[in-house]
Structure formats: structure tokens, C-alpha cells
């Protein structure tokens, strides 16, 4: 049993059953009802929400416990999501491209792999498609209300603009907000939103 299996091994949903506030706020940037990849979706709150909004959703996670809870949540909401057990570090990102790629709070990615994983998210986005990224900035470690205690796991606006310099960036904003997203994300938080459009070839 891996770390995430242990963390999800409880009845309640660690990050709640409702979608991330940022996803609801940024949803209008996504290709409507498009084929959508939600990476490392844990217990399924974001994939279930997008499926309920008419998107064709594939969601991945490396926790069998999390995936089981995600499937239960999808059944609870009477929606269909293609759930895949997958290690974000082993995925063949070029094998299939999506209208939308959504990555929310994937702060578990270590600094040594962060740039390559973030770049691969763009690789999985179709020309004309949308990449949505939401996470913490380094200031988050001073709040301690979610995410790892290491600031090197976090994103900055400048870093995202540099990594995604080849995308049409429509949103790249750091801000402070109060989150109430289960036990895992609760309280004053330092956040960053990113929307990039893959240019048509």
C-alpha cells in the first residue's frame, strides 16, 4: 500500500466531494464538452464535476483506494468517468492528446521531476486545446493549510510563464484565498491559477 492509499483509507473524502473552487472559476476556459484528462485526481471530486458538466473525462491516479472512492462518487452522481490506475511519472504523454488537460494540486511532484511533468502536461494537450493548472505558491508553507512543507514543490507565476512560453497564456495569477475543501485543503492559502492554450499547428 502506497502513501496515497494510506491517506485515502478512511470513510470521509480527504479533499471533500465538491470540485476545487479554482476549477469552477476557470471552467469557462475549457473546450466545452471536450475530451478531458484529469491527472492525479485522487478521490475524484474534479473528474466527477467535469463529467456532470458534460465533458468526456478520463482521470488518473496512483492510488487504488482513491480510485475506488472516485468510482463510488461517480456512481453517486450518476456520471461516467474513465478511471485509470497510472503513475504520473511513467505515463506516455504523447500517446494521446486531449481537448483539455487539468492538473489540480499535483504538488507531490518532487522538484527534480517538476519541470518535465509540467512540460508533459502541455504535450498531452491538443493544438487548440486548454491546459488548466492550479496549485500552491511557495508562500503556502507559512500557512500550513495544505500541501507539502517544502516550498520547492510549489509554483510561481514566473516559473509557469517560463515553462509554458510556447502556449497562449490567458491566466497566470498568484493570489491568497480561504479554502474549505475537506481536511486536506482548509484555511488561508497561497494559490496560483494557470490557463494556457496550445497553439494551432
Image (tube, grey):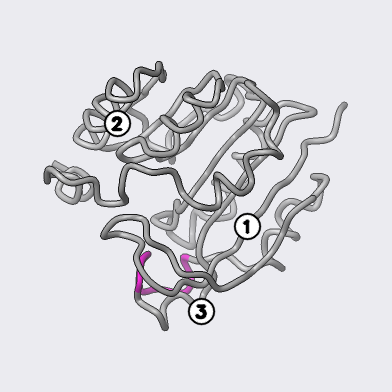
Judge whether residue 147 is colored magenta.
yes
Residue toward you, 127 or 20: 20
Q: Which residue is mark 3?
A: 139
The tag earlier along the polypeptide, 3 or 1, is 3
- Seen at 68% across and 34% down, the residue is 30
Given contact means CB atoms under 8 Å apart, are the residues at marks 3 and 2 in contact?
no
Query: What residue sits 31% from the left and 51% below the top?
Result: 15
Residue 70: which numbered mark, if any? 2
For mark 2, give the secondary structure: helix
Q: Secondary structure at mark 1?
A: strand
* CA–CA distance in space, label 1 to label 2: 24 Å
Vertical placement of residue 197 versus 74, above or below: below
In the displayed structure, would residue 183 be above or below residue 47?
below
Question: What span is in magenta?
Answer: 145-153
Residue 149: say if magenta. Answer: yes
Is the residue marked by circle 3 packed among few (<14), some (14-19), or many (20+) residues within 10 Å?
A: some
Badge 1 crowding class, 10 Å Cα cut-off, few under 14, some 14 to 19, many 20 or more, is many
Relative placement, left or right, of 165 versus 187 is: right
Q: Is residue 39 left or right of residue 161?
A: left
The spot of residue 89 in percent (x, y) is: 43, 41
Amino acid at each position: 500500500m502506497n502513501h496515497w492509499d494510506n491517506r485515502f483509507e478512511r470513510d470521509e473524502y480527504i479533499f471533500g466531494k465538491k470540485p476545487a473552487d479554482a476549477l469552477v472559476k476557470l471552467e469557462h476556459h475549457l473546450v466545452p464538452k471536450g475530451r478531458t484528462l484529469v491527472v492525479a485526481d485522487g478521490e475524484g471530486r474534479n473528474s466527477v464535476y467535469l463529467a456532470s458538466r458534460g465533458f468526456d473525462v478520463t482521470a488518473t491516479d496512483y492510488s487504488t483506494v482513491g480510485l475506488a472512492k472516485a468510482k463510488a462518487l461517480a456512481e453517486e452522481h450518476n456520471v461516467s468517468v474513465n478511471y485509470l490506475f497510472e503513475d504520473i511519472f511513467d505515463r506516455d504523454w504523447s500517446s494521446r492528446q486531449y481537448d483539455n488537460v487539468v492538473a489540480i494540486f499535483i504538488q507531490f511532484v518532487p522538484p527534480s521531476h517538476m519541470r518535465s511533468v509540467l512540460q508533459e502536461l502541455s504535450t498531452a494537450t491538443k493544438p487548440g486545446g486548454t491546459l488548466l493548472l492550479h496549485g500552491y505558491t511557495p508562500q503556502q508553507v507559512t500557512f500550513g493549510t495544505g500541501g507539502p512543507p517544502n516550498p520547492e514543490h510549489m509554483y510561481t507565476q514566473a516559473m509557469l510563464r517560463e515553462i509554458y512560453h510556447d502556449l497562449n497564456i490567458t491566466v497566470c495569477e498568484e493570489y491568497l484565498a480561504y479554502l474549505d475543501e475537506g481536511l486536506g485543503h482548509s484555511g488561508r492559502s497561497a494559490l496560483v491559477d494557470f490557463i494556457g492554450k496550445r497553439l494551432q499547428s
